[in-house]
Image (cartoon, grey):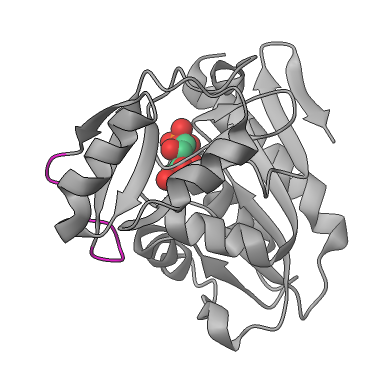
C-alpha cells in the first residue's frame, strides 16, 4: 500500500473505532489534513447516527458541510465526545507534532475539549523522538521577529512559512533542528514567548489512542 492508501485505511479504522460510541446527540471533533479528509468522507457514510461536528479549520468545515454534515461553533457545544485528527509525527507516548497544515491552534482547542483524542496516522509519522519534522508555531504577525529570536535562544532554527495566513489571521514559523528531550516542558516554554499563540507540540494533551496504518494493517496504541 502507498502512503495515500494507508491514510485511507486508518481513516476507515477510525470510523470503525468511533461508530459504536456514537449516540444521536454526539458531537464529533474533526481535524485537518489529507488523512482527516478521508475521515470526513467516511464520516459522511454514517451521518445521522450522531448530531454533528466541530471542525478544526475552515477547510474541514467546508468539506463536512459539502457532505451535509452539520458543523457547530465550539462555543455552543457542551461536550465533544471524540476528536479525530492526523499528525505530522507521533512518538511511542502518543505525543505529537502537528500543524503541517497550519491548523494547530484550533486543533489544540478541539483536542482540549474532547473526551477522547484519537490520532490517525500512517506509519511514516512514527518516530522514537519528536523533532525531525520542523515544529510549527502560530505567531501574532507583529511579533514575528521577536518570537524568531527567542526560538533561536531555545536552540531552534526558525523559518517563516511564506504566504501562509492561518484561519485566525496569524503567521506560522517552522522551527528546524529543535532538540525535543522533554516535549511537555518545551511545549510550555515556547508558549510562554510573548506573541506565540501556540505551538504544534501536543504533549500536555497528547492523543489517548493512536491508530497507526502500516503494511501489516492498522495497529491500535492505547
Ligand atoms: C494540520 C495537521 C495535520 O494533522 C498534519 O499536518 C497531518 O496531515 P496529513 O494527514 O495531510 O499528513 O496537523 O495542521
> From what the image shows, is residue 217 above or below residue 196?
above
> From what the image shows, is residue 58 above or below residue 212?
below
Where residue 26 sits in the image (x, y, percent)? 75, 74
Drawn side of residue 213 relative to residue 38, left or right? right
Q: Residue at x 69, y 26 (%)?
A: 212
Outermost residue, left side: 163
> From what the image shows, is residue 45 above or below residue 7?
below
Q: Residue at x 51, y 75 (%)?
A: 71
Camera-side residue of 26 and 138:
138
Q: Which residues are magenta?
A: 162-169
Drawn side of residue 49 relative to residue 101, left or right? right
Drawn side of residue 86 relative to residue 47, left or right? left
Residue 161, quarter of the rendered image? top left
Residue 115: within the magenta?
Answer: no
Residue 195, quarter of the rendered image? bottom left
Which quadrant would the C terminus be assigned to in this image? top right
Q: Residue at x 30, y 39 (%)?
A: 150
Which secondary structure type mostly characterizes the magenta part of the structure? loop
Residue 168: within the magenta?
Answer: yes
Where residue 196 sits in the image (x, y, percent)? 35, 54
Camera-side residue of 91 and 204:
204
> From what the image shows, is residue 184 above or below residue 64?
above
Outermost residue, front side: 153
Q: Residue at x 54, y 56 (%)?
A: 108
Amino acid at each position: 500500500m502507498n502512503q495515500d492508501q494507508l491514510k485511507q485505511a486508518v481513516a476507515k479504522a477510525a470510523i470503525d473505532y468511533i461508530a459504536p460510541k456514537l449516540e444521536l446527540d454526539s458531537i464529533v471533533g474533526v481535524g485537518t489534513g489529507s488523512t482527516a479528509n478521508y475521515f470526513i468522507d467516511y464520516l459522511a457514510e454514517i451521518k445521522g447516527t450522531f448530531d454533528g461536528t466541530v471542525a478544526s479549520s475552515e477547510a474541514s468545515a467546508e468539506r463536512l458541510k459539502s457532505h451535509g454534515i452539520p458543523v457547530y461553533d465550539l462555543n455552543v457545544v457542551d461536550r465533544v465526545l471524540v476528536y479525530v485528527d492526523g499528525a505530522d509525527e507521533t512518538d511511542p507516548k502518543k505525543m505529537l507534532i502537528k500543524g503541517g497544515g497550519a491548523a494547530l491552534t484550533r486543533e489544540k482547542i478541539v483536542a482540549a475539549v474532547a473526551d477522547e483524542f484519537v490520532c490517525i496516522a500512517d506509519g511514516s509519522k512514527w518516530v522514537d523522538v519528536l523533532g525531525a519534522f520542523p515544529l510549527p508555531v502560530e505567531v501574532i504577525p507583529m511579533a514575528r521577529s521577536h518570537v524568531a529570536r527567542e526560538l533561536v535562544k531555545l536552540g531552534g532554527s526558525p523559518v517563516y512559512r511564506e504566504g501562509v495566513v492561518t484561519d485566525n489571521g496569524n503567521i506560522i514559523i517552522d522551527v528546524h533542528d529543535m532538540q525535543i528531550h522533554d516535549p511537555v516542558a518545551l511545549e510550555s516554554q515556547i508558549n510562554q514567548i510573548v506573541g506565540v499563540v501556540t505551538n504544534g507540540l501536543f504533549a500536555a494533551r497528547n492523543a489517548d489512542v493512536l491508530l497507526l496504518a502500516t503494511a501489516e494493517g492498522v495497529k491500535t496504541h492505547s
